Amino acid sequence: MTRAIDLHSRQLAKQHELTGPQLVCLRQIHREEETSPTKLARTVSLSQATVTGILDRLERDGLVRRERSARDKRKVLLSLTDKGLKLVRAAPSPLSEEFRSRLASLPEGEQAMIDWILRRVVEMMEAGDFDASPLMSTGPATAQAGDIADFLEHDPAAQDDVDAAE
């Protein structure tokens, strides 16, 4: 996973001189008219300070405009410049969108197993509470009992976790 993320990031930087988080912010500004920096930070799950730094760079590079709202001068609204719009249209999908698309094409049983495995990895890394639903949301998980039984048969520790959860 780390290698795929690294390769995708390098390709994005080389071809478009963008980082992954910058592309995510550009795409969100494109999707949502009249978004504010605060709303953008919340939507893309980044801190306000991180988004401010990203917006500073995007504005400096002529990709984003910050303007005061005509209705409420206290509010700053974000929009793409023509250059930013062209870049969003030309840039590849963020890796997370590609992953979501590929994950959705898998049988539901495999989706459920991947969800379970990723949650286990996070637990092992002691990452604290983790809600994979925004990333893993592809509809209700209706794994086939046989798929999961086969998986649990090969990993007795997994069966112990399932038993403990019940």
Image (cartoon, rainbow, N blue to C red):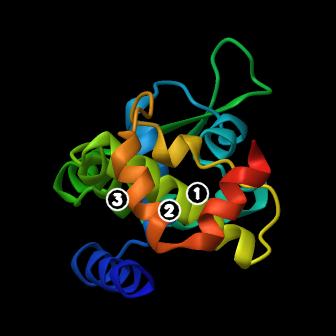
* Whether label 1 touches label 2, CB < 8 Å: no
**Left or right: where does residue 51 sit relative to residue 139?**
right
Q: Residue at x 47, y 66 (%)?
A: 153
Q: Disc 2 residue type?
A: Leu
Q: Position of residue 89 (x, y in %)?
A: 20, 48
Q: Residue at x 57, y 41 (%)?
A: 133
The residue tagged with tag 3: helix, strand or loop?
loop
Quarter of the N terminus within the rendering: bottom left
**Mark 2 vs mark 3, CA separation in Å:** 33 Å
N-term mark: 1 or 2: 1
The label number, if any, that marks residue 94 in the structure image: 3
**Left or right: where does residue 141 sit relative to residue 155?**
left
> Which is more toward the observer, 66 or 162?
162
**Mark 1 vs mark 2, CA separation in Å:** 46 Å
Residue occupied by mark 1: 55
Q: Position of residue 15 (x, y in %)?
A: 21, 78
Q: Disc 3 residue type?
A: Pro
N-term mark: 2 or 3: 3
> Which is more toward the observer, 55 or 162?
162
The residue tagged with tag 1: helix, strand or loop?
helix
Q: On screen, 17 above or below 145?
A: below
Q: Residues within 10 Å of mark 2 (few under 14, many from 20)?
A: some
**Mark 1 vs mark 3, CA separation in Å:** 18 Å
Q: Farthest residue to the top: give it.
A: 71
Residue occupied by mark 2: 152
The residue tagged with tag 2: helix, strand or loop?
helix
